[in-house]
Amino acid sequence: MSKVVLVTGGSSGIGKAIGEFLQNKGFVVYGTSRNPSNYKNSKFPLVALDVTKSNSITQCVEEVLIRTSRIDVLINNAGAGITGPIEEIPEEEIKRNFETNFFGPLNVIKAILPEMRKQGSGIIINITSIAGYMGLPYRGIYSASKGALELITEAYRMELKPFNIDMVNVAPGDFATNIASGRYHAPAKEDSPYHPNYANVLKMMDDHVDDGSDPKQMAQAILRIINTSKPKIHYKVGAFMQKFSIVLKRILPDNIYEKLLMNHYKL
């Protein structure tokens, strides 16, 4: 019997690439979007979901279970970018980002776990970010929300062992997607004490996304994880130097690593 996969944030970008790839490999795929009617040409069914609203999560999971009677794989991909000097980002935007990138995935997991326990199996794949392994200038809130999901997965995974349910993180680097268009940007004000540094870093980030890797690499990595009998806790997918930056953080003194980051961002 084909495994049933639920991909949150499946209407575009990495989520869409994962959903299409897995469907072509024989999986039964359902994606989610806040407004499925906007994506009538989706190659797999989209179910309405806003991860910041508990009733929306409950309705989404119930709808998929009515159609399929099981969920074997949850891919927690829905997320949002945010940039800006931490001092200048409004508190409500910080909270909104954590609601989407941290609390949202946790609540989707909570909604699906009872069914996976009943099945006696399942795998939950949280899409985090290489940015979650380090505090990056003008991306501090994003780094923090993704880093929180990375860490809580380590604890959650151990709690789920008795139920034969796996949980892993997959941290992508820069991929060619439309994430920049949906990202919250604190305005790069010319009278800000952080100008022009923030403006320059913002342009660099957008250029990195435009020159990013093919999202199909993420889809291929997800397939390998699903087919692995004993998946690892952490996976990184992206350009060599982006993945190597995590290794450097482990082995270099903090001040040296900080200097490398500041040089990279021309600060």
Image: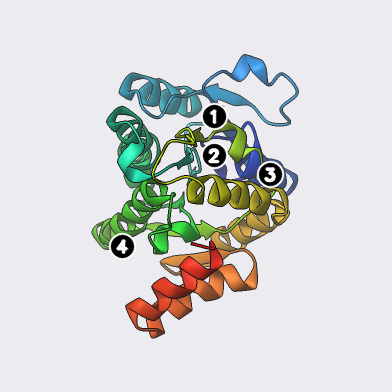
N-term mark: 2 or 4: 2
Q: Residues within 10 Å of mark 4 (few under 14, many from 20)?
A: some
Measured from the top left, where is residue 151 in percent x and y?
Answer: 31, 59
Q: Residue at x 50, y 27 (%)?
A: 64
Q: CA distance from mark 2 to mark 4?
A: 21 Å
Measured from the top left, where is residue 152 in percent x and y?
Answer: 28, 55
Q: CA distance from mark 3 to mark 1?
A: 13 Å
Give the left or right position of residue 6, taking residue 87 as reference.
right
Residue beneath disc 4: 154
In the orientation shown, which residue stands out farthest toward the front?
191
- Kind of residue indicated by mark 2: Val
Q: CA distance from mark 3 to mark 4?
A: 26 Å
Q: From the viewer's side, name the closer residue of 15 and 129.
A: 129
Please, what secondary structure does the residue beneath circle 4 have?
Answer: helix
Residue beneath disc 3: 17
Q: Residues within 10 Å of mark 3 (few under 14, many from 20)?
A: many
**Quadrant hosting residue 28:** top right
Give the left or right position of residue 156, taking residue 65 as reference.
left
Please, what secondary structure does the residue beneath circle 2 have?
Answer: strand
Q: CA distance from mark 1 to mark 4?
A: 25 Å
N-term mark: 2 or 1: 2
N-term mark: 3 or 4: 3
Residue beneath disc 1: 32
N-term mark: 1 or 4: 1
Q: Residue at x 53, y 31 (%)?
A: 68
Please report contact status of discs 2 and 1: CB closer than 8 Å, yes or no. yes
N-term mark: 3 or 1: 3
Q: Is residue 187 visible?
A: yes
Please, what secondary structure does the residue beneath circle 1 have?
Answer: strand
Please report contact status of discs 3 and 1: CB closer than 8 Å, yes or no. no
Residue beneath disc 2: 7
Q: Residues within 10 Å of mark 1 (few under 14, many from 20)?
A: many
